[in-house]
């Protein structure tokens, strides 16, 4: 996801509020929003996979290695 795509999402939103969108623009908006959501999910998943916790016995458990490959979708 780059700045151009985010700017286009915002342009389409403002246009939809002001005058409405045609079918091609609605489809483009939906595709851009889906790509944005996928990007946010991937970034969050990457951050969560980097979390490690220290157990009471002093050992370190990497939660990304323990739970990272499991899908809940």
Image (cartoon, helix red, strand yellow):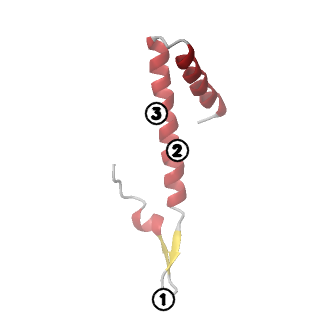
Q: Position of residue 13 (x, y in %)?
A: 55, 23
Return the disc, 3 or 1, that comes first in the chain's sequence.
3
Residue drawn at the location 47% of the way across and 40% of the way down? 38
Task: Determine which residue is flagged by label 2.
Answer: 40
| Residue at mark 1 to residue at mark 2: CA–CA distance | 35 Å
State the separation of the CA atoms marked 3 and 1. 43 Å
The furthest residue to the front: 18
The image shows residue 3, relative to residue 8, as above or below, that is below
For the N terminus, the quadrant is: top right
**Along the line of sight, the residue nearer the viewer: 18 or 62:** 18
Residue at (49, 34) in percent of width and height: 35
The quadrant where residue 47 appears: bottom right
The residue drawn where x is 52% and y is 36% is 36
- Tell me where residue 10 appears, x and y as whole percent: 60, 26
Earlier in the chain: of badge 3 and badge 2, it is 3
Q: Position of residue 51 (x, y in %)?
A: 53, 66
Element at label 3:
helix
State the residue position of label 3: 34
> Tag 1: Cα neighbours inside 10 Å, few (<14), some, or many (≥20)?
few
Q: Position of residue 73 (x, y in %)?
A: 33, 48
| Mark 1 / mark 2, whichever is N-terminal | 2
Mark 2 Cα shell of 10 Å, populated few (<14), some (14-19), many (≥20)? few
Any mark on residue 57, and which? Answer: 1
Does residue 42 lie above or below 30 as drawn? below
Badge 1 marks a residue whose secondary structure is loop
Q: Are marks 3 and 2 in contact (CB under 8 Å)?
A: no
Question: In screen coordinates, is 25 left or right of 10?
Answer: left
Would residue 10 be found to the left or right of residue 63 on screen? right
Do tag 3 and tag 1 residues touch (Cβ < 8 Å)? Answer: no
């Amino acid at each position: 996801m780059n700045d151009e795509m985010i700017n286009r999402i915002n342009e389409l939103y403002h246009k939809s509020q002001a005058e409405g969108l045609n079918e091609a623009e609605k489809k483009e908006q939906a595709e851009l929003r889906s790509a944005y959501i996928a990007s946010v999910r991937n970034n969050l998943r990457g951050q969560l996979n980097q979390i490690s916790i220290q157990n009471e016995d002093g050992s370190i458990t990497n939660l990304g290695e323990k739970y990272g490959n499991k899908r809940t979708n």
